[in-house]
Image (tube, helix red, strand yellow):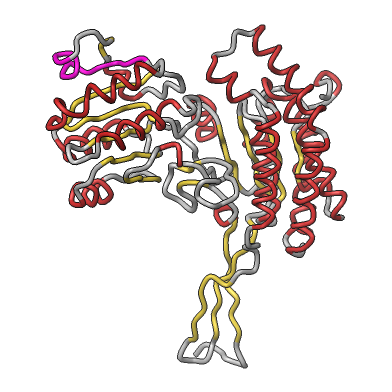
């Protein structure tokens, strides 16, 4: 890490921008084989440097303990042998994806003989700003490279040592494949001013910003960015249990949606139960959650049936707990669930558990969130689970990219028009 007192942050960031822009020009014409080779080498290096990565992570975890970091954030920060293998496997999976650059998305002929092609192209230079999760360093770097983009990574100060150790592995892979080392850069200072500079676009060097973190980070990026933003808002995810749901399935899915990993954006934060299922589904599901260590925050209707739970406040319905806490409400069928979700959702991920196809169809048609699931856990809201290899985040906006932001979402397109002498009258 550089000493900020000895380095002008603005000059540092502008130089990183210039290097990234130059690298992006070479990446745009890099062969699929060379990018594949770089990614394979990166994955191998991650495994080879496992001990160094764990040692760096231990420093971050020690600092987290001293600062009393929340358990959910510590979970995101923590690396172990299994998670490091998963990082390497994720890079390998990205390597095996079809290279999107140069793909013809559509083509057609005009009556005047012109042949028009819409072709995938890299976005250029991407700035990724993220918190706590060092695995994002690898995911973002690998995805951007596969799509032919240069990337400037700005990780959180709490994961700086871990992210830098992973970044060294990515740079080694670039060098091994003969690609510019500046293709994947990591901001080497913890100074928050670096984020502000990145958001300016670095004198036109940066084409898009991807924030991945808490509500305050995303709000700052959306407020200050002078370049387009792929918004990744908080994951206030809902699970609705319809009266037609299979009880065993509903219990299993709700438990997994909430408790598999409580600190990820796809974790369910609100459970909605059909009023027609109070006597059959409600208590078995709440008992399973309670036995697993989940705190229940119940609506007035739930408290009338089971008064022992903690009352939910209005704020609970719009809170991303990222912890073993879930808010629970009774709703009047699928219509009531849709009304509740449309009022409080962050448009990330919602699930319906039902056997009634009409209820499912209505749920899918009337809720406008990025990801909708039927009879499956909300924790499948993940680029890897979608077969994308990995993701930079879940985009909850409606422009350009929505849902998991993977390789294809990190490209734009251009038109190639072929003629044989046509002029416009």
* Residue 301 magenta: yes
* Residue 96 magenta: no
For this rendering, which residue is in front, 111 or 329? 329
What's the residue at 60%, 49% (across, down)? 389
* Image spot of residue 227 (x, y percent): 58, 44
Quadrant location of the N terminus?
top right
Q: In the rendered view, does 82 fall on the left or right side of 38?
A: left
For this rendering, which residue is in front, 65 or 46? 46
* Image spot of residue 163 (x, y percent): 73, 30
Q: Can see residue 29?
A: no
The stretch of residues the image draws in magenta is: 295-305
Quadrant position of residue 305: top left
What's the residue at 82%, 27% (across, down)? 52
* Image spot of residue 353 (x, y percent): 28, 40
* Image spot of residue 122 (x, y percent): 65, 58
Q: In this view, does 38 lie above or below 32?
A: above
What's the residue at 69%, 46% (across, down)? 91
Q: In the rendered view, does 107 fall on the left or right side of 145?
A: left
Q: Is residue 319 above or below residue 420?
A: above
Quadrant position of residue 15: top right
Q: In this view, does 202 lie above or below 112?
A: above
Q: How many labels does the image show?
A: 0
For this rendering, which residue is in front, 40 or 149? 40
């Amino acid at each position: 890490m550089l000493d900020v007192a000895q380095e002008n942050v603005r000059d540092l960031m502008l130089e990183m921008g210039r290097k990234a822009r130059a690298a992006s020009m070479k990446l745009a014409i890099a062969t699929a084989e060379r990018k594949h080779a770089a990614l394979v080498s990166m994955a191998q290096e991650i495994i080879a440097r496992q001990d160094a990565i764990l040692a760096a992570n231990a420093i971050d975890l020690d600092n987290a303990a001293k600062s009393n970091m929340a358990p959910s954030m510590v979970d995101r920060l923590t690396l172990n042998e299994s998670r490091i293998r998963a990082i390497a496997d994720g890079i390998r999976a990205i390597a095996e994806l079809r290279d999107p650059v140069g793909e013809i998305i559509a083509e057609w002929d005009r009556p005047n003989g012109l042949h028009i092609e819409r072709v995938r192209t890299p976005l250029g230079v991407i700035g990724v700003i993220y918190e706590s999760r060092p695995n994002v360093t690898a995911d973002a770097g690998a995805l951007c490279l596969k799509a032919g983009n240069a990337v400037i990574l700005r990780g959180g100060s709490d994961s700086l040592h871990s992210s830098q150790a992973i970044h060294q592995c990515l740079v080694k892979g670039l060098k091994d494949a003969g690609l510019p080392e500046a293709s994947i850069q990591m901001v080497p200072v913890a100074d928050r001013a670096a984020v502000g500079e990145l958001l300016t676009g670095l004198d036109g060097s940066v084409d898009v910003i991807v924030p991945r973190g808490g509500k305050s980070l995303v709000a700052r990026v959306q407020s200050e960015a002078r370049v387009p933003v792929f918004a990744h808002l908080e994951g206030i995810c809902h699970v609705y249990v319809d009266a037609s749901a299979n009880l065993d399935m509903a219990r299993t899915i709700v438990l997994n949606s909430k408790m598999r990993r409580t600190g990820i954006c796809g974790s369910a934060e609100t459970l909605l139960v059909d009023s027609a299922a109070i006597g059959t589904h409600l208590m078995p599901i709440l008992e399973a959650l309670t036995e697993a260590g989940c705190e229940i925050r119940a609506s007035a209707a739930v408290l009338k049936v089971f008064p022992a739970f903690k009352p939910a406040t209005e704020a609970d319905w719009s809170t991303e707990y990222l912890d073993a806490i879930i808010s629970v409400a009774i709703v009047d069928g699928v219509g009531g669930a849709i009304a509740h979700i449309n009022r409080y959702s962050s448009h990330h991920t919602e699930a319906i558990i039902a056997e009634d196809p009409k209820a499912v169809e209505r749920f899918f048609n009337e809720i406008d969130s990025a990801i909708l699931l039927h009879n499956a856990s909300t924790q499948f809201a993940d680029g890897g689970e979608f077969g994308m290899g990995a993701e930079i985040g879940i985009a909850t906006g409606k422009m350009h990219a929505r849902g998991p932001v993977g390789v294809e979402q990190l490209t734009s397109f251009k038109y190639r028009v072929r003629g044989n002498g046509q002029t416009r009258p």
